[in-house]
Amino acid sequence: MIIPYEQLHPDTLNALIEEFVSRDGTDYGTNEISLAAKVEQVRCKLAAGEAVILFSESKGLCNIVHKGML
């Protein structure tokens, strides 16, 4: 199920994005990028409709994915 990011409380959205960008295996290239910058990049992708928040009812988990992966 796709969850509109606008429906999440700002603190919840921020925590979800921070967890997403800090996962092992997330690659941002050779340049070091701050956590705040990574969060803002993901927030912009959500606002632009390039990424979506998926919620799995069966697993009770949320994930952020590129819209093209749906």
Image (tube, grey):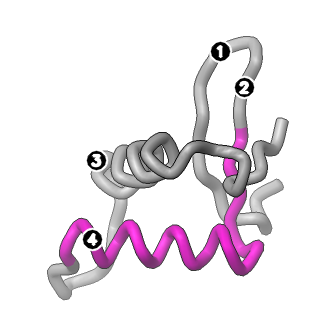
Q: Is residue 19 left or right of residue 3?
A: left
Name which quarter of the figure residue 11 lies in. Answer: top left
Q: Name above or below for residue 65 compared with residue 29.
A: above
Residue picked out by circle 1: 59
Q: Of tags 2 and 3, which is closer to the observer?
A: 2
Label 2 crowd bin: few (<14), some (14–19), many (20+), radius 10 Å: few
Q: Of tags 1 and 4, which is closer to the observer?
A: 4
Are dots 1 and 4 in contact, CB under 8 Å?
no
Label 1 crowd bin: few (<14), some (14–19), many (20+), radius 10 Å: few
Name which quarter of the figure residue 68 lies in. Answer: bottom right
Q: CA distance from mark 1 to mark 3?
A: 20 Å
Residue depicted at x 74% and y 12%: 58
Label 3 or label 4, whichever comes before in sequence order: 3
User: What numbered label is drawn on residue 36?
Assistant: 4
Label 4 or label 2, whichever comes before in sequence order: 4
Are dots 1 and 2 in contact, CB under 8 Å?
yes
Q: Which residues are magenta?
A: 34-54
State the SS at label 2. strand
Q: CA distance from mark 2 to mark 3?
A: 21 Å
From the viewer's side, name the closer residue of 59 and 11: 11
Label 1 or label 4, whichever comes before in sequence order: 4
Q: Name above or below for residue 34 compared with residue 8.
A: below
Residue picked out by circle 2: 56
